[in-house]
Amino acid sequence: MAETETEPGGGGQPSFNAENARLAALPGAVEAVRTPEPRHALAPGIWMDYQPRAGVEVAAGPESGEAGLRLQLLRRGESPWFSLSYGLDMAVLRQCRYLGQLMVCSSRGPGRFRVCLRYHLDDGFRDVFARDLVVLTGARQEDLVFIRVDAELAAAAHGAEVLYFFEGCSFDVTLHSAEALLI
């Protein structure tokens, strides 16, 4: 079993350092892509996903002129979901009471998404959604949402990931930064 990452100078407190480093590097690591196969790896450990063969048209890549990942859903087709996701360290998650998501986003037009914590279990998965919906209306904004960690599910899970489930038939959203917080 791998050792749990701890916050530098934090007295041995666990943290999501590896996840946050991947999220911070995403704008420079992602290459522009148009309508890739579902569960497309934008960067190591970070995926864009939607239902296969559902007529989805999407573009993703670095935001021009400033740091960020630009996601454009041009046509949702028949896909019941569109998500951006990343994996979590289970040892750290098991020490959380709440999982926080601190995000800075902007949009060209309206955009909405709900944050989800997915527990990977032996018999499938279980999704737990944040109560708050992130609503984007154009300007750059910072949002903090949180999800209560279920200790029993975390103990039984062999993996977990955070998903941002986007709503609507189309959108044009830029994720400038994201950070997982152990609360």
Image: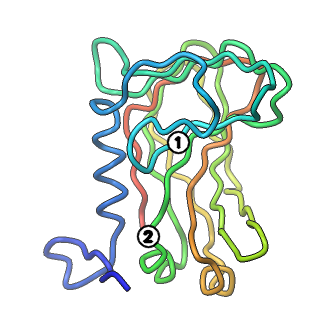
**Image mark count:** 2
Query: In the image, what residue type sits under mark 2?
Result: Asp
Could you tell whether 44 is left or right of 78 in the image?
left
Residue 92, image quadrant: bottom left
Determine which of the numbered discs, if any, sits on residue 89 in the image: 2
Residue 80, image quadrant: top right
Q: CA distance from mark 1 to mark 2?
A: 16 Å
Q: Label 2 crowding class (10 Å Cα cut-off): few <14, some 14-19, many 20+?
A: some
Q: Secondary structure at mark 1?
A: strand
Could you tell whether 35 is left or right of 78 in the image?
left
Residue 53 on image: x %, y %: 78, 26
Q: For the view shown, which residue lies furthest in the left direction?
A: 9
Query: In the image, what residue type sits under mark 1?
Result: Trp
Could you tell whether 15 is left or right of 116 in the image?
left
For image coordinates 43% across by 50% down, the residue present is 45
When the figure is inspected, residue 72 is found, relative to residue 158, above or below; the finding is above
Q: Secondary structure at mark 2?
A: loop
Q: Are marks 1 and 2 in contact (CB under 8 Å)?
A: no
Which quadrant would the N terminus be assigned to in this image? Answer: bottom left
Q: Label 1 crowding class (10 Å Cα cut-off): few <14, some 14-19, many 20+?
A: some
For image coordinates 45% across by 35% down, the residue present is 42
Determine which of the numbered discs, if any, sits on residue 47 in the image: 1
Residue 99 on image: x %, y %: 52, 66
Determine which of the numbered discs, if any, sits on residue 60 in the image: none
When the figure is inspected, residue 178 is found, relative to residue 99, above or below; the finding is above
For image coordinates 70% across by 74% down, the residue present is 121
Mark found first going from the N terminus, 1 or 2? 1
Residue 26 on image: x %, y %: 34, 37
